[in-house]
Image: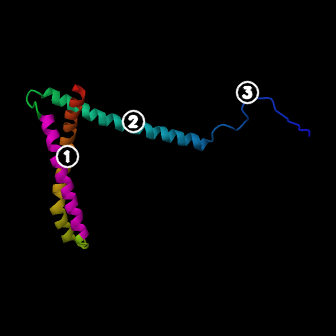
Amino acid sequence: MNFQFECAQPSDAAPAGTGPPPDAIDLLRQMLAVQQEHLAFARAVQDAGARWRTVLSRWQGDFPGLPEACKHVLPVLERAYIDLIAELTNHLRDQTDALDNEFALAEFLDRYGGRLNQLGTLLNVVGPIAEVAVSQETGSK
């Protein structure tokens, strides 16, 4: 048995037209832009915590236990918020025609809209301050 093998010499030059297609380059640029946007959002979230730490340190003499108090009331607010959402969903599930006309929609929004919005706002204010208390606890350990 005889076999013949032919091997080409390796070449340093890349064959013409083997670069990435223009679509791939555009896609990579778009992915980089999205990653930069995500990084900016992550930094903004961290800045919010830093901002609250700065504000609280400035007013620590006047409100010494505020972060700790927020940490303790946060679960109560979360529970009230979730209870209201559960009540809202049960109401809609039980009354399928609850939003059929303008009067029913207005009544529904009067009943749930304001309270849900206000509780959500309270959670958005108290939550970051409570996180400051948690970060202070982990930092002191």
The answer to whether 99 is drawn above or below residue 53 in the figure is below
Residue 99 belongs to the span the image colors magenta: no
Q: Which quadrant would the C terminus be assigned to in this image?
A: top left
- Seen from the viewer's position, the closer of residues 48 and 8 is 8
* Rendering quarter of residue 108: bottom left
Q: Residue at x 21, y 70 (%)?
A: 102
Q: Which mark is residue 39?
A: 2
Q: Residue at x 34, y 34 (%)?
A: 43
Instruction: Let me know if residue 98 appears in the view.
Output: no
The answer to whether 29 is drawn above or below residue 64 in the figure is below
Secondary structure under the numbered disc 1 in the rendered image: helix
| Residue at the disc numbered 3 | 12
Q: Which region of the structure is painted magenta?
A: 66-93
Mark 3 Cα-neighbour bin, 10 Å: few <14, some 14–19, many ≥20 = few
Q: Earlier in the sequence, mark 3 or mark 1?
A: 3
- In the image as oriented, which residue stretches furthest toward the left? 62
Mark 1 Cα-neighbour bin, 10 Å: few <14, some 14–19, many ≥20 = many
Identify the amino acid type marked 2: Leu
Percent position (x, y) of residue 113?
A: 19, 59
Q: Main secondary structure of the magenta part?
A: helix
Q: Which mark is residue 72?
A: none
